[in-house]
Amino acid sequence: MSAKNSDDGVRLQKVLSQAGVASRRAAEELIAEGRVSVDGKVVREMGRRVDPDTAVIHVDGSRVIVREDTLHMALNKPKGVHSTMSDEMGRPCVGDYVRERAESGGARLFHVGRLDVETEGLLLLTNDGELAHRLMHPSYRVLKTYLAEVPGPVAKDVGKRLKAGIELEDGPIKVDAFRLVDSLPGKAMVEVVLHEGRKHIVRRLLAEVGYPVQRLVRTELAGVQLGNQRPGSLRRLTRAEVGLLYSAVGM
């Protein structure tokens, strides 16, 4: 049992306070207002004790991670870096950027999906294996946003064609959203949003409609944005961002 009313466990308001949700007094108000649930059930009593290692806690429907050893990180992967935690040939890889942080966390880090070696941008890492699995599984339809530089100008009907669906060698694919971001002489920037995770899918898709990708950056995944994070930099996700990830896959 993760929730207890005996002397076992930690008071719920203290757990929320230590997780950075609110002060202990404000956490008590959240509980009294019925905005906190433990293991799927709303909790209103102040004496409720929980086991922080096993309790699944939500505030206003958003998951709160209370285990101190749980890591959720964002890497802005530079071009030329392989999406692996180690490389037998000594090539630059994601593990080079996260090894020290992973070792301090004491648990294996999983990268959420892959970016091919030439693609830059947002790569999420976590030691919550179930979360990583769900974020990558096609049944959860997790949205990913990419910014691509392609030859210009871009025909007006490209977005309509991509939303309607394109037949590739491994099956049909259609984007969830498409827009022209910028147009310059000889090149353009387009934004592609899709939930597919097939290998090189964005590059293959744009090449199929006549716009081979010259540069590709993933800017968002499951609501977490790359923003102005520097290439090669690693940061811990905010509590709000972590909540977005768990909400996206129903955890």
Image (cartoon, rainbow, N blue to C red):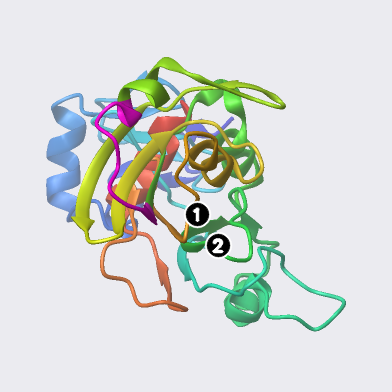
Question: Disc 2 to disc 1, how far (Cα)?
Answer: 6 Å
Q: Label 1 is placed on what type of residue?
A: Arg
Tell me, yes or no, whether the two marked residues, 2 and 1, touch with CB atoms within 8 Å. Answer: yes
Q: Position of residue 107 (x, y in %)?
A: 68, 63
Dividing the picture into quadrants, the one containing residue 82 is bottom right
Residue found at the very far top of the displayed protein: 164
**Badge 2 is on which residue?**
69
> Which residue is found at the position 53% from the left and 36% from the top?
205
Q: Is residue 212 visible?
A: yes
Q: Position of residue 94 (x, y in %)?
A: 63, 71
Q: Give left or right: position of 34 versus 42.
A: left
Q: Label 2 is placed on what type of residue?
A: Asp
In the displayed structure, 103 sits above or below 38; it is below
Q: Position of residue 154 (x, y in %)?
A: 30, 42
Asked if the stretch drawn in magenta spans residue 157, the answer is yes
Q: What is the crowding at mark 2: few (fewer than 14 residues within 10 Å), some, or many (at least 20)?
A: some
The local secondary structure at tag 2 comes to: loop
Asked if the stretch drawn in magenta spans residue 105, the answer is no
Magenta residues, start to end: 148-159
**Badge 1 is on which residue?**
67
